[in-house]
Amino acid sequence: MSNRRMDVANSVEIAWIHSSTSLAKEATKESYSSQSLDFAGFSAGEDINSPTLIVVIEPRIFIRECLTQCLRLVLGCSVTSFPSVDAFLAVSDSLSASVIILSNSDKPAAAAVRRQLFVLKQARNQVPTIILNDLDDPDEVMGALNGGARGYIPTSVPLQVAIEAMRLVKAGGVFVPASSLVSMREKPTKAPDQAAKCGPFTTRQAAVVEALCRGKANKVIAYELDMRESTVKVHVRNIMKKLKAKNRTEVAFITSNMMRSQNV
């Protein structure tokens, strides 16, 4: 008899837990549903009327799942996720992605972001990419934009701002956080003598010269400076002409002497 009462009690308790969980889920859905009405361009049911697909790339599984579930609830559109850029590229031809959210936790992030954006450029279908990162340093933001990103969302902004940023990028715009723009304005400008350090070279040529002095190959220079290898070769030829150098070794030798004389 006592066992039967315990079974009944357990059944009641399980039923209560199930009921409470269901109510909590419904409340969450209603909460996010009401929020999604505020975000024009990503309203509920949009995945039926227009082929909107958000791709989240994030290596940390917990963060990846949280981002995916949150965006699905708030945006009301299809959201899929991948642990890496390579995993996404493996199936990218079968997806019609509208926006890629590339989440990066590296500090500083510029080098890692540049590598990932470079790999994404190899995809047959170019998809607007937004960087999501904890940092809002102006150099990080500009590095991402120069690497091909269409937006940069620091995790310090509210969710509504992040959603509006996605909407802007999806529509063809570029998003830069206001905090970074303010920091850029407050950043001191380069001293006049710093510009002179480029000598007879353009800024791009000076970057190539610096890489040559470090013994880097054209492919590596192209990757690091985000340019085509053929463009690097043109820069190298023009640099050699300006310096009247016969080869890359002479370029490194002459420019090293130039730098020493400037520092004297």
Image (cartoon, rainbow, N blue to C red):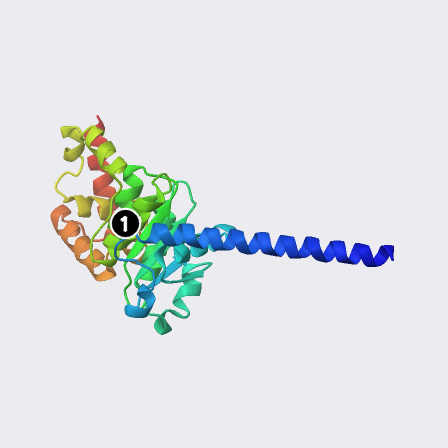
Among the 4 quarters of the image, the one containing residue 105: top left
Q: Is residue 191 left or right of residue 160?
A: left
| Depth check, front residue: 141 or 10 | 10
**Residue 111 in the image: above or below residue 72:** above
Q: Horizontal placement of 186 versus 103: left or right?
A: left
Question: Image quadrant for the C terminus?
Answer: top left
Under mark 1, the amino acid is Glu
Q: Nearer the viewer, residue 228 or 96?
A: 96
- Picture coordinates of residue 46, whole percent (x, y): 31, 64
Q: Is residue 77 above or below residue 107?
A: below
Residue located beneath label 1 in the image: 164
250 to 43, vertically: above or below: above
Residue 214 showing in the rendered view: no
Q: Give the quarter of the figure containing the N terminus.
A: bottom right
> Which residue appears at 40% of the width and 48% of the height?
104
Relative to residue 161, is residue 90 drawn left or right? right
Image point (34%, 58%), residue name: 100
Q: What percent of the width, then of the height, locates residue 231?
A: 19, 58
Closer to us: 117 or 171 = 171
- Mark 1: give few (<14), some (14-19) or many (20+) Cα within 10 Å: some
Residue 17, image x and y in percent? 63, 53
**Residue shown at 20%/53% (left/top)?**
173
